Amino acid sequence: KSFAGELAGRAVPVDVAVSAHAGQRLRVTVQAEGHAALTLEDDEPLAVAVKHPVTQEMLEQQWGRLGGTGFVLRRLTASLSGAPMVPLSVLGRLRREMVAQLTAQRDALPPRVHTVCPETVLPRLRAGVERVADHAAEPQLSVLCRSLHQLHLLLAHRPALVYADFQDIREYRQAVALAHEAQTQIYLATPRIQKPGELGIFHALYRHRPDGVLVRNLAGLEFFRQRGTRTIADYSLNAANELTVAYLQQLGAERVTASYDLNRDQLVDLAQHGRVEQLEVVIHQHMPMFHMEHCVFCAVLSPGSNKTNCGRPCDRHDVQLRDRVGSAHPLKADVGCRNTLYNATPQSGAEVVPALLRCGVRYFRIELLHDEPAQRLAQCVQLYRDLIAGQVSARHVWTTLQAVNRAGVTRGTLEHRRDPLAIL
C-alpha cells in the first residue's frame, strides 16, 4: 500500500525561504523533494511592528507545524528588514496553502507501478537454475546427535554422515576423534545465532578439523568458505525455493537443507525444480518451536545472572516445559546460552520420502534429541534405512516410532493438501 501511495511513507523534507520587509508584501518560496517549487505571497504590505516584529525563531515555529501532513520542515531561511509585523493568521493561511498545493502535486504524479508477470519471470529465473538429478546414486541417511553418548551408539551403526550438535563445544574434540577412529564423516554444527564478538566459536570449531560444518547462519557460511571447509546449510537459512538453494550453493554450501516451512507438496515441488543433487531433507525430528536469548537454566537453577557466574546448570540438569495438556517439551541450551524449546512428540516426514526419491533426492537426515536407550536409537536408524531402501512402508515407520505424520512446522497450511470434503 505504501508503494502504491495508499499509505504515507516517510515525510517529504521541505525547504522554506521567507522574505519579510516592512512596506512590502510577505513572500514565501517553497521547495519540497520531488515537487515543483512554489511561491506564495500575501495581499497586503507588511506594517512596522509596534511591539513584536517577526523573527527567525517565530517563523521556524510556525512553518514547522506540519505534523500529519506528510511533509516536514527541513530548513528555513529568512530575509528580514524594517522590523515588520506578520500576523500569525497570515502565516497559518500560507502554511495551509503550501500543504494543499504540495499535496495536489503529489496526487497528480503518475502512480509508481512495478508490474511483475509470474508467467514470464518465474520460468526465466528457474531456467537459470541448472538441475542435475542422479537417480543412480545411492541414497544416504545422516544422523544428528546431541551428546557423546548418542555418538558412541550411532557409530556402531556406521552412518554415512553424523552431525554433532553439542551444547558444550569442548566435547567436539573427542567427538571428531571418535568419528574418525570409526572411519565416519562428522560435521560440527554452529550455533543458530552469531553475534559480534562471538567469532571465537567459529575458530574453535575450525581448530577441531571436522570433515565439514553444518552452518546455521550466513556468517558461518562465509567464515568456513574462506578457510576451504566443506559446509552444509541448515534449515535456519530458510531455503524454501530453488532460487534460494542455488544462491546458498553459490555462497559455498555443498548441500542445502530444505526449509521447515515447506509442506509435503512444496517439498516435492522444490525437488522437481531445484538443484536436487544439493538438497537435503530432514525426515525425522523434534520440531524446534522457538529459540530465545533468555536462559531458563540460569533463571531457575542458578543464583547467577549470566554465563559468567551461573555455574552452567545446563551441563547437569534436564529442563522440560509442561504445556496446558501435560506434554513436557525439552529445553536445550547452546554454547551461547540461547535456549531452544523442542516439541515433545517427534515428527516424521516418512510419507514424502518415496516421492522425493523419485524426484532424485539422495540426502536424508534424522535428528535425535533425547539420550534414548540403545535399542530405541538403533530401531529409529534402521527403520529409516529400510524406508529409503523401499523395504518398509512409510506408515509402518511413523506408527512404530509413535511420531506425528507431518512434514512442515505446524498443522494446517504446512501440512499436505487434504480433500476439503473428506469430513462429510
Image (cartoon, helix red, strand yellow):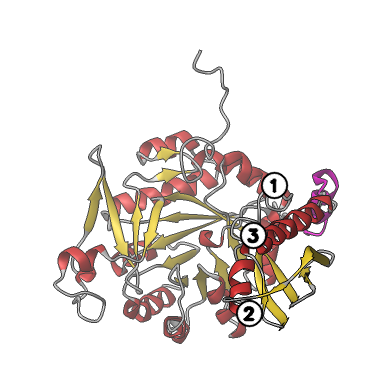
Residue located 84% across and 51% down the image: 108
Location of mark 3 (residue): 89
| Label 2 packing within 10 angstroms: few (<14), some (14-19), many (20+) | few
222 or 280, which is in the foreground? 222
The amino acid type of the residue labelled 2 equals Gln
Q: CA distance from mark 1 to mark 3?
A: 32 Å
Location of mark 2 (residue): 56
Location of mark 1 (residue): 6
The amino acid type of the residue labelled 1 equals Glu
In magenta segment, residue 394: no
58 or 364, which is in the foreground? 58
Q: Main secondary structure of the magenta part?
A: helix
266 or 149, which is in the foreground? 266
* Corner quadrant of residue 421: top right
List the single residue furthest toward the front.
50
Residue 326 placement (x, y as % from top left): 22, 40
* Above or below, 161 relative to 346: below
| Label 1 packing within 10 angstroms: few (<14), some (14-19), many (20+) | few
Side of 412 where 148 appears, left or right:
left
* Above or below, 17 relative to 132: below
Residue located 86% across and 47% down the image: 120
Please indicate, yes or no, whether residue 136 appears anywhere in the rendered image. no
Residue 106 placement (x, y as % from top left): 78, 55
Q: Earlier in the sequence, mark 1 or mark 3?
A: 1
The amino acid type of the residue labelled 3 equals Ser
Q: Which residues are magenta?
A: 116-130
Residue 273 placement (x, y as % from top left): 73, 49
Side of 126 where 414 appears, left or right:
left
